[in-house]
Image (cartoon, rainbow, N blue to C red):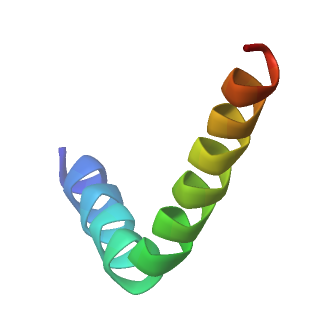
Amino acid sequence: MHTLEQSYRGVTLLMELNWDRFLFLATICLSLLCGAWLGSL
């Protein structure tokens, strides 16, 4: 249980530090999907 709590804290810290990178990747994926959708019309 203790190990689980420590790994959860580590993941939370990683998300706090890198949330902007995840947002950047999500934006790129969304734009690629929108472009593919527009190309299929």
Foreground of the two, 16 or 5: 16
Q: Is residue 26 left or right of residue 39?
A: left
Percent across and percent down for residue 7 are 35, 58
- Name which quarter of the figure residue 8 lies in: bottom left
Vertical comparison of 17 with 19: above or below: below
Q: Residue furthest top?
A: 41
Vertical comparison of 38 with 32: above or below: above
Q: Residue at x 46, y 66 (%)?
A: 23
Foreground of the two, 3 or 17: 17
Percent across and percent down for residue 30 are 57, 44
Q: Quadrant of the C terminus?
A: top right
- Name which quarter of the figure residue 10 lies in: bottom left
Percent across and percent down for residue 24 are 56, 69
Q: Is residue 41 left or right of residue 15?
A: right
Q: Residue at x 66, y 33 (%)?
A: 33
Foreground of the two, 18 or 2: 18
Q: Residue furthest front?
A: 41
Q: Quadrant of the N terminus?
A: top left
Q: Is residue 37 left or right of residue 2?
A: right
Q: Is residue 39 left or right of residue 24?
A: right
Vertical comparison of 21 with 6: above or below: below
Q: Residue at x 70, y 28 (%)?
A: 38
